[in-house]
Image (cartoon, coloured by chain):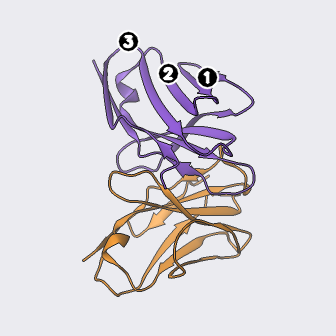
Chain colours: A orange, B purple
């Protein structure tokens, strides 16, 4: 059984560019949540995908979008990058949308926007 | 709006002693609370949780206490071990949405 993996581990982009981050769920998990963790802060909920549909969204603008694929892996896309988008992006998978205790986090992708 | 607050950025304790990490929340709609532990270069891992219908939950060396009237929860680790050194996040949610709110974290250092 493999854990949650994320790619890439680190990324540098410039303001205005677009970025795609990827997440592979733990085997058997159909729900993926994405979080943004700014330096010195806790993770902040971006959105959740359940069986390929968005299932809840936090207070993030529409330029943050996502996809979930039939194999339940997921992508986070951010358009028109801003300096404040620099953060650690975490994805977490679970076996159901309400599975808070059984939510397994990946190691994150650290994004730096210059 | 920071609905979950951990006011102590860091805590240092001696091995074998008790570690007490605190967390306050403002949203009375929260009905489920969790503690996560995070090591460097790893994602947070679930540690222990408590439902709002309880005031205490215990799992081995870890105990979480919930005071709903004060909107306060705490994590007690007894006895503390050097391997407990990590950043601890408290998180809160309610059954009606998937938006789990995290505190900023407390870095615990347990000295041998």
Q: Residue B87 — which label?
A: none
In the rendered structure, the residue with mark 1 lies on which chain? B
Discs 1 and 2 carry the same chain letter: yes
| Residue designated by label 2 | B76
Circles 2 and 3 on the same chain: yes
Would you place residue A89 above or below residue B10 in this image?
A: below
Q: Nearer the viewer, residue A88 or A106?
A: A88
- Label 2 environment density (alpha carbons within 10 Å; few <14, some 14–19, many ≥20): some
Q: Residues within 10 Å of mark 3 (few under 14, many from 20)?
A: some
Q: Name the residue located 62 percent from the left edge and 38 percent from the top edge.
A: B33
Residue A111 image-quadrant placement: bottom left
Q: Residues within 10 Å of mark 1 (few under 14, many from 20)?
A: few
Q: Nearer the viewer, mark 2 or mark 3?
A: 2
| Circle number at residue B59 | 1
Say which element carries label 2: strand
Task: Please tell me if label 3 and label 1 are on a single chain.
Answer: yes
Residue B16 disc label? 3
Q: Label 1: state its secondary structure.
A: strand
Q: Quadrant of the C terminus of chain A?
A: bottom left
Total numbered labels? 3
| Chain ID of residue with mark 3 | B
Occupied quadrant, residue A45 = bottom right
- In the foreground, A10 or A98: A98
Q: Position of residue A89 (x, y in %)?
A: 44, 63
Frontmost of labels 1 and 2 is 2
Image x and y of residue B2, in percent: 48, 51
Q: CA distance from mark 3 to mark 1?
A: 17 Å
The residue tagged with tag 3: helix, strand or loop? loop
* Alpha carbon separation for disc pair 1 and 2: 10 Å
Q: Position of residue A41 (x, y in %)?
A: 39, 52
């Amino acid at each position: 059984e493999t854990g949650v993996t994320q790619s890439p581990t680190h990324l540098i982009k410039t303001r205005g560019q677009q970025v795609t981050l990827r997440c592979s769920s733990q085997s058997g998990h159909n729900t993926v949540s994405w979080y943004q963790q700014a330096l010195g802060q806790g993770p902040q909920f971006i959105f959740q995908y359940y069986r390929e549909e968005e299932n809840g969204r936090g207070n993030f603008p529409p330029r943050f979008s996502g996809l979930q694929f039939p194999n339940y892996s997921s992508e986070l896309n951010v358009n028109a990058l801003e300096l404040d988008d620099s953060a650690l992006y975490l994805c977490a998978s679970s076996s159901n949308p309400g599975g808070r205790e059984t939510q397994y986090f990946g190691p994150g992708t650290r994004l730096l926007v210059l | 709006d920071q609905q979950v607050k951990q006011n102590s950025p860091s805590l240092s304790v001696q091995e074998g002693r008790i570690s007490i990490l605190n967390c306050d929340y403002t949203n009375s709609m929260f009905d489920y609370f969790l503690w996560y532990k995070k090591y460097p270069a790893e994602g947070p891992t679930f540690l222990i949780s408590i439902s709002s219908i309880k005031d205490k939950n215990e799992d081995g060396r870890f105990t979480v206490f919930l005071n709903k009237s004060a909107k306060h929860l705490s994590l007690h680790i007894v006895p503390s071990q050097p391997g407990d050194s990590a950043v601890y996040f408290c998180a809160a949610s309610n059954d009606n949405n998937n938006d789990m709110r995290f505190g900023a974290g407390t870095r615990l250092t347990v000295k041998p």
